């Protein structure tokens, strides 16, 4: 089996600069639970990038970041509006509902992106005591389908939400891929676009169990208490903060996200060339490739044959849809080897 798989960017290695940041933070005893110089430095860096005083809370997982964020942003009687393809809907074991007690209100979105038109077409039963009240809008950038919200799209959604008194949460598990795709900075697609609370995802982009919740709206209070009781307060927070600081330094994280995106684009090009050469049956991409995720339809027998040589996930088994994901450490030779193995598998069925 190949050393590099395209199943998930969670498979990837730790970037050397991030690993060095962990080593550097390991030189002596340091205060725990975020009361350390590394976490203070991360707060200062993010606040400078956003040009405002933000609160940054290092956490351990993307699911944890989402649960902490929506719990902090929402009243106890509220509900979370999100895409029907959202990570909280299908990939977090119901964590946000189980741990926060907040119901999810899914909205259909063919490409994973919510629109104002789709939201306005729904009767939200405002003020009706028998119905969960929509109090927080949650989006992801990039989305679960690899698509990317522009700054204008986020701003339009935020204006809609704020006009209804709602908060806006952005799941940034792959935010560096989004920033690279948009060629913009963190501020542009968060506070400038009206986002109230968001996460900086590092684990999928060269880090080890490192995410951060960023509170941009000063009206969101008590996040530190929520972080603790939801079991997302790391005792040795410095190792999380140091990793994220390393990715923010000199735009390293954006550079890594850009490389992953480019490898996904190369993968689509190679697959298109192979398909056009008539050496295999034509391939159908099911989503527009905008970041580092590639979705396509494969007959079940071909997918099974290819799985004998490499690992990847069915996205929608009933629709024969699979997902391939490139990472910061995916090389051109990895892509070529992957496509060669796919061609070989296609000739075996």
Image (cartoon, rainbow, N blue to C red):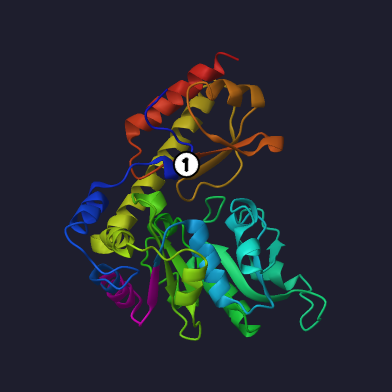
The residue lying toward the viewer, choosing from 162 and 68, is 68
Q: Is residue 320 visible?
A: yes
Q: Which image quadrant for residue 346?
A: top right
Above-or-below relation of 1 to 222: above
Residue ID at (49%, 80%): 222
- How many discs mark residues in the rendered view? 1
Residue 117 among those drawn in magenta: no
Residue 46 among those drawn in magenta: yes
Image coordinates for residue 162, horizontal then vertical, percent: 59, 82
Q: Which residues are magenta?
A: 41-57
The residue lying toward the viewer, choosing from 25 and 139, is 25
Q: Is residue 149 visible?
A: no
| SS under mark 1 | loop
Image coordinates for residue 1, horizontal then vertical, percent: 42, 22
Q: Position of 203 compared to 347: left or right?
A: left
The residue lying toward the viewer, choosing from 183 and 19, is 19
Above-or-below relation of 168 to 5: below
Image coordinates for residue 268, horizontal then vertical, percent: 47, 37
Residue ID at (32%, 50%): 256
Residue ID at (39%, 77%): 55
Q: Which image quadrant for residue 303?
A: top right
Write down the residue under mark 1.
8
Q: Which image quadrant for residue 26?
A: bottom left
Q: As drawn, which residue projects farthest toward the bottom? A: 219
Residue ID at (44%, 31%): 270
- Quadrant for the C terminus in the image: top right
Q: Position of 66 compared to 123: left or right?
A: left
Q: Position of 131 compared to 209: left or right?
A: right
């Amino acid at each position: 089996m190949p050393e590099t798989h395209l199943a998930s960017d969670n498979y990837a290695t730790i970037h050397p600069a991030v690993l060095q940041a962990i080593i550097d933070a390991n030189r002596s005893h340091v205060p725990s639970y975020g009361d350390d110089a590394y976490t203070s430095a991360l707060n200062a860096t993010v606040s400078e990038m956003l040009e405002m005083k933000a609160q940054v809370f290092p956490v351990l997982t993307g699911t944890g970041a989402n649960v902490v964020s929506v719990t902090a942003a929402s009243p106890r009687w509220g509900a979370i509006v999100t895409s029907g393809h959202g990570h909280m809907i299908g990939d977090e074991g119901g964590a946000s509902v189980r741990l926060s007690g907040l119901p999810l209100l899914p909205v259909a979105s063919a490409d994973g992106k919510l629109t104002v038109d789709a939201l306005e077409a729904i009767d939200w039963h405002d003020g009706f005591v028998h119905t969960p009240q929509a109090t927080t809008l949650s989006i992801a950038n990039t989305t679960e389908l690899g698509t990317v919200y522009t700054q204008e799209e986020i701003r339009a959604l935020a204006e809609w939400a704020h006009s209804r008194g709602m908060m806006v949460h952005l799941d940034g598990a792959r935010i560096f891929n989004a920033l690279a795709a948009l060629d913009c900075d963190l501020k542009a697609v968060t506070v400038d676009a009206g986002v109230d609370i968001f996460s900086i995802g590092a684990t999928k982009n060269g880090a080890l169990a490192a995410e951060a919740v960023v509170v941009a709206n000063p009206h969101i209070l008590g996040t530190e208490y929520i972080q603790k009781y939801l079991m997302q307060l790391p005792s040795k927070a410095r190792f999380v903060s140091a990793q994220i600081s390393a990715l923010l330094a000199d735009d390293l994280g954006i550079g890594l996200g850009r490389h992953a995106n480019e490898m996904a684009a190369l993968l689509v090009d190679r697959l298109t060339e192979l398909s056009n050469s008539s050496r295999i049956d034509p391939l159908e991409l099911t989503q527009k490739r905008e970041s580092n995720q590639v979705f396509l339809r494969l007959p079940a027998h071909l997918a099974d044959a290819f799985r004998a040589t490499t690992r990847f996930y069915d996205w929608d088994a009933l629709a024969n849809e699979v997902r391939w994901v490139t990472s910061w450490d995916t090389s051109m030779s990895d892509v070529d080897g992957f496509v060669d193995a796919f061609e070989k598998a296609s000739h075996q069925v």
